[in-house]
Image (cartoon, rainbow, N blue to C red):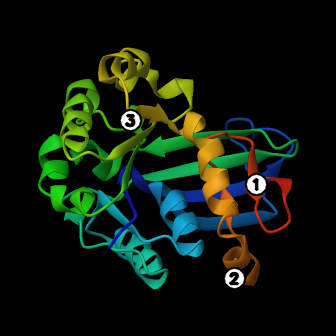
Amino acid sequence: MSEVCVTGNLNADLILHPLGDFPAWGTEVVADLMSWRPGGIGNVLLCLARLGVGVSAVANVGKDFIGREMLSTLEEAGIDTSHIERSLNVPTAISVGIGREDGERAFVTHLGHLELLDIDLVLRHREAWKEAQCVLISGYLLLPSLGFKGTRTLIDEVRAEGKEIIFDWHAPSCCDALCPAPTPLLLSAGAPCRTILEAACDLQHHWALRSSMVSSSPNPVVNSVGLGRFFFDIKTSRERRKF
């Protein structure tokens, strides 16, 4: 049984860093470091799985190589992917992240399959959150087809099951034009719907209770909780640059 069900933007992240600054148009620069990984809710899923939390996802990917590789990565980590749909005729969404030497970042995103994630898709997999104790809704500003109305319906449906809801709307302000601002949504939803920042302290406390398991884990565990600049390394209780 899953303790946490996560629904939202499952996309690929391609990270290039560090750069002194962006290259001028018509030029090319070489980045010293590159990484590829499941991004969006993929970060949360992998972090929770490494902590030993039972976790499932309600999401979609494109039916292409990138989508297959992301699903394989999640499955290898023991994550339930049975509620992740393979959307036809669209590429898997990808975000290209550029990291500056001082740790600041910028992203260029192609929405791809994320444009097809709507309330009908999510409700087809309602059994996923019925089995969970908590539901995290993430990436609101990158899900235009779900939008305000669909997200509000989802919150009502999850609340009707008596589940705790945590809401992460996705931080970058450049995405605001895709969906209405999230503040009215949260106000209309009311308790018990919390933002992920409000839940962060409780999550840290919850993870501290698992300290013996974390310290014995061969995998590093990080908590990015939408804060933007840093990962928090639970094993050593220190902050380190995301890039």
- Number of numbered discs visible in the structure rendering: 3
Q: Which residue is mark 3?
A: 140
In this picture, residue 60 sits left or right of residue 10: left
- Which x, y percent locates residue 116? 21, 46
In this picture, residue 1 sits left or right of residue 161: right
Earlier-in-chain disc, 3 versus 1: 3
Residue 88 appears in the picture as rendered: no
**Which class describes the residues within 10 Å of circle 3: few (<14), some (14-19), or many (20+)?**
many
Q: Which residue is mark 1?
A: 232
Residue type at numbered disc 3: Tyr
Query: What's the distance in space between the residues labelled 1 and 2, CA to CA?
Result: 16 Å
Q: Nearer the viewer, residue 64 or 38?
A: 38
Tell me, yes or no, whether the two marked residues, 2 and 3, touch with CB atoms within 8 Å. no
Residue type at numbered disc 1: Phe
Q: Nearer the viewer, residue 134 or 31?
A: 134
Residue type at numbered disc 2: Ser
**Which class describes the residues within 10 Å of circle 2: few (<14), some (14-19), or many (20+)?**
some
- Which x, y percent locates residue 155? 27, 36
**Label 3 secondary element:** helix
- Which x, y percent locates residue 105? 71, 40
Q: Quadrant of residue 120?
A: top left
- Which residue corresponds to the image point at 38% horizontal and 35% vertical from the top-left? 140
Give residue 217's mark: 2
